Image (cartoon, helix red, strand yellow):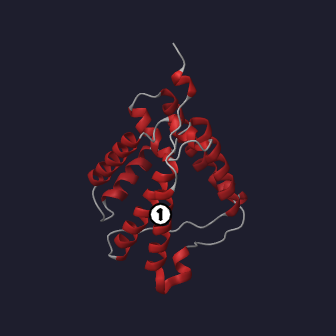
Amino acid sequence: MIDRVTNMFNIVANGGHGSVWTVLFIGFLFGAIIMYSRLDKFEKMAGFMIFEDTLVPRMAMTTVALSSLGFYFLVQNGYATFAIKPILLGGLITGAIIFGIGLVILGKCPSAFFVSVSEGRVDAFVGVLGGMLGGAVFTLLYPWIKEFMGPNLGNLQVTQFFTEHSLLVVLIFSTILLVTAYFLPTLEYKDPADFKEK
């Protein structure tokens, strides 16, 4: 396990796209944004799940839109590379269900767990341990699990269907997300328990 972690850092350091320190700086910056926007709070995700808070979808759409544009230009100019994973239908559906259950129970996205841990949240720490354990089990059992992943639909990308207009596809996709995020009504969930007389 230690060798794998060491190898992970070596891959980042030798990837030619920035040092480990650059990656750590981006991670800390990302965590600061999550803390500032309060996306690591349980009530934000809970409010989203009951359609009484729109911060999560607005932030997600804005992030995906801007990241899509930035990543596209980084790749086109040779500053970034990526590998498309194959769509294994059975695994995709099963993983989505497990992810959704964990999201509802713990009230956080995986990226917010470590931010919450840094704030001393025990529930987030349990979630991180559970995620690491689940990842370890999946890795050990993968040779057996992959037999039940379902049909392989290949390494699909939306842009590959519009190879001559890939930039236009990214621009349209990002614009739709940004416009939708802008026009979503601003709702903020307030837990009734916070207003009870003590």
Residue at the image point whose x is 32% and y is 45% from the top: 28
Question: SS for tag 1?
Answer: helix
Residue at the image point whose x is 50% and y is 84% from the top: 163
Instruction: Please name whichever residue, 180 or 24, is drawn nearer the observer in this view of the structure.
Output: 180
Decide: few, some or many residues near mark 1? Use Cα within 10 Å; few <14, some 14-19, many ≥20.
some
Residue at the image point whose x is 38% and y is 49% from the top: 6
At which x and y percent is residue 160?
Answer: 53, 79
Single out the residue that lies furthest toward the bottom: 164
At which x and y percent is residue 164?
Answer: 47, 87
The total number of labels drawn is: 1
Residue at the image point whose x is 47% and y is 63% from the top: 179
For disc 1, the marked residue is 179
Q: Quadrant of residue 78?
A: bottom left
Answer above or below: position of 54 versus 89.
above
The amino acid marked with disc number 1 is Val
At which x and y percent is residue 121?
Answer: 46, 28
Residue 179 in sight in this render = yes
Instruction: Please name whichever residue, 100 or 149, is drawn nearer the observer in this view of the structure.
Output: 100
At which x and y percent is residue 189?
Answer: 53, 37
Single out the residue that lies furthest toward the top: 198
Residue 83 in sight in this render = no
Instruction: Please name whichever residue, 150 or 8, is drawn nearer the observer in this view of the structure.
Output: 150
